[in-house]
Structure formats: C-alpha cells, structure tokens
Image (tube, rainbow, N blue to C red):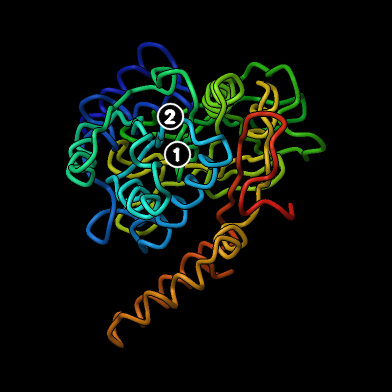
C-alpha cells in the first residue's frame, strides 16, 4: 500500500468507510500525493492522451468558436477567456493562435486558468509564455463580467457518489479496507430519494453534486455577465443507471481501488444532469452533440486538407490518423459529447444550429 493508501486506510479505520466522492477527491487532489498534484499525466509517456494532444486542429477550431462567440457578444473590449483543467496548456495555446485571425480578440481576452496542480501550472506557463495568464484554484475565483469558458475533460474527473439498489431501497457504495486492500461495501442505511428511476435490484446509479455545483457556478456568471461555455467530455446524453467509475494508467485500464494517487480516476459525465444544473441557474443550453458532429460542423475536414497540403507524406498520414481519432465512430467521435452553455435569449452557437 502506498503512502496515500496508508493515509486513507487510517482515516477509514478511525472514522469508518469513505464515500467514493471523498476517495476520488483525495486520490486525484491530495496536496502531496494526489494524482494531478504530483505529476504530468498527459502524452505517450503518461497515462492518457487528450484531444488537444492528438492534433492542433482541435484547439484551433475551439479558438475560432470562441472568436465567433466574442463577436456575437458585441466584441466587448475586455472579457475573461477561461479554461478549466487546462492540462499542459496546449488547447489554449492553439486556440489563441487561431483566434488571432479575428481582429481584436486576443487583445480583449484576459486569459484565466482554473488549475490546482503545481506541475501542470508550470507546463501551462511554458506553453503560454507569450500571453499574460492568471491562475485560480476554483471557478468561484474567476472575475465577474463577460466570460468564455472551455472545459475539455474537466467534469469527468470531478468526484461522483454511487448508490446500489437493494430490496429495501438504495444504499450508498462506500470505500472500506480489507487487510491491505481497499474494497467497496454498502452503507447499511437506506438513502432517501431515487438516484435512478426504474432501476432493477442490484443496479448502480451515479450522481455528482460536485459537477452540478461547478456547472451552476459557470451558468450563474454566464447568465449575469454574458458569454458562453463549451463543455467537452465523454459520457451519456440521458441520466441512466450504470457503474462507469474507471482508472487509467499507462494507457490502459486499472483497478480504481488499487494504489490511489497513481492512476487517473474518472466516470462518465451525465449531460442531462449538467444541462439541468445550467438551466436551473438561468443559462440556456445547446446540445449535447457528438464530438464528431461538432468538429465536422466547424470544418475540421477542410482544416485537415489545408494542413496536408503543406505536409510531407508521413505528416499527411499522421494528420489523417488524427482526424480519424477525433471524429471516428470507433474512436472519440461518438463517445465524446459537446454541450454549449450561453446567456439566455441568444441564437444557437456554431456547431449547434441543427440541434
């Protein structure tokens, strides 16, 4: 058992089993041993690769989306351009480079990053060395006013709670210790409410107050100050029962209960719940649509052709491979969804006109 494991095991022995949400929060965000606070997990040498690392096309199209939204907002002379969980800063760097084609956009943008990891903040600082950037630990710290916000694979890593249906009702799944290993047990107390409707006995349901709270904070600022948000993540369109908690390590699946802090813990995003949270705080929502539908609507195929026109045969092959990875039905194209959140009363943003 590693250091974080011993710390959590001692907590459990003293206070009883932890909720999965508390276990996830510690495994990912413990200030000393947490997964994101202690390492750079991205890239071929890490544990997974996100869309911005697959190809520059991804960040470029998001930058153009933001530039169009800024223009639709009336091109305010100052606005907050924020990214939540910005990884190495690759997406923001690509977005700003592409959005510079819109006169005045980069000069008006005040770049803010919501990032708790010192390791990743350093990488972001390098990637955005030509820009003035302000970092925050929490969404609530973003300054008021017009806001354009990007959240790519942010919500999937926010903690979830799990409940399992028994004959007498729903019981929360908790993390306990069995010898030197963590295991899941059911809280004997029945949980009020219905985490998932029409679920059979034995079914598992997931809820995430942390995700709803984060979306609520964004929606409130967008509703009051103007702007829009782009949420990109893997998950399901409708709330449904199912166990989606998973761990990723060295580009493969791992046991979520083994070696906390050494693997990425995530769960599928419930886009219906996110949309409900946003609308409940006064914002309009659009989508979700598949990542393939969104990127194709923004012209990723045309951008790929442009890049291939100036590429070597080997580079052209890599561009085609990246295009397939981002939009293919058997890759990220269908699993990943895109949802927009906007100030009330506006027209559908680019990529959502037909949804």
**Element under label 2?**
strand
Which residue is at 32% across, 29% downward? 29
Left or right, residue 87 beside residue 78: left
Q: Residues within 10 Å of mark 1 (few under 14, many from 20)?
A: some
Which residue is at 40% across, 39% downward? 257
- Residue 306 position by quadrant: bottom left
Q: Nearer the viewer, residue 115 or 186?
A: 115
Residue 107 appears in the rendering? yes
44 relative to 314, above or below:
above
Q: Nearer the viewer, residue 165 or 44?
A: 44
Image quadrant where one finds the N terminus: top left
Left or right, residue 268 beside residue 348: left
- Estimate the x, y position of residue 293 in percent, counting from the top left: 62, 61
Whole-angstrom CA distance, mark 1 to mark 2, is 22 Å
Q: How many marks?
A: 2
Precedes in sequence: disc 1 or disc 2: 2
User: Are the residues at dot 1 and dot 2 in contact (C-beta closer than 8 Å)?
Assistant: no
270 relative to 94, above or below:
above
Q: Nearer the viewer, residue 279 or 273?
A: 279
Outermost residue on the bottom side: it is 313
Left or right, residue 279 beside residue 133: right
- Estimate the x, y position of residue 162 in percent, counting from the top left: 58, 31
Q: Which mark is residue 79?
A: 2
Q: Which mark is residue 126?
A: none
Residue 186 appears in the rendering? no
- Estimate the x, y position of residue 332 in percent, counting from the top left: 51, 62
Camera-near label (1 vs 2) is 2
- Estimate the x, y position of residue 100 in percent, counting from the top left: 36, 50
Residue under circle 1? 154
Outermost residue on the right side: it is 198
């Amino acid at each position: 058992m590693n250091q974080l494991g011993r710390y959590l095991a001692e907590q459990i022995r003293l206070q009883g089993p932890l909720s999965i949400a508390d276990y996830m929060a510690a495994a990912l965000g413990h200030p000393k041993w947490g997964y994101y606070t202690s390492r750079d997990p991205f890239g071929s040498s890490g544990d997974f690769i996100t869309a911005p690392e697959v190809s520059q096309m991804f960040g470029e199209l998001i930058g153009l989306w933001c530039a169009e939204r800024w223009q639709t907002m009336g091109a305010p002379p100052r606005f907050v351009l924020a990214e939540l969980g910005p990884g190495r800063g690759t997406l923001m760097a690509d977005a700003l480079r592409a959005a510079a084609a819109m006169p005045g956009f980069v000069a008006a943008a005040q770049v803010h990053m919501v990032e708790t990891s010192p390791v990743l903040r350093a990488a972001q600082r390098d990637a955005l060395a030509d820009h003035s950037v302000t970092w925050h630990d929490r969404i609530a710290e973003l300054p008021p006013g017009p806001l354009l916000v990007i959240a790519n694979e942010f919500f999937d890593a926010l903690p979830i709670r799990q409940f399992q249906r028994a004959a007498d009702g729903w019981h929360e799944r908790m993390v306990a210790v069995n010898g030197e290993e963590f295991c899941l047990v059911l809280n004997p107390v029945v949980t009020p409410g219905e985490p998932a409707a029409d679920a059979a006995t034995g079914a598992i349901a997931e809820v995430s107050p942390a995700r709803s709270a984060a979306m609520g904070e964004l929606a409130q600022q967008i509703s009051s100050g103007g702007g829009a948000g782009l949420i990109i993540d893997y998950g399901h369109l409708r709330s449904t029962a199912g166990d989606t908690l998973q761990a990723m390590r060295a580009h493969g699946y791992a046991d979520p209960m083994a070696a906390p802090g050494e693997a990425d813990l995530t769960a599928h995003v419930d886009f219906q719940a996110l949309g409900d949270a946003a609308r409940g705080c006064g914002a309009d929502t659009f989508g979700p649509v598949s990542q393939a539908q969104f990127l194709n609507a923004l012209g990723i195929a045309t951008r790929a052709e442009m890049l291939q026109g100036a590429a070597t045969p080997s580079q052209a092959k890599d561009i085609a491979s990246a295009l397939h990875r981002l939009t293919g039905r058997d890759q990220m194209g269908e699993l990943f969804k895109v949802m927009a959140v906007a100030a009330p009363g506006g027209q559908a943003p680019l990529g959502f006109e037909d949804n």
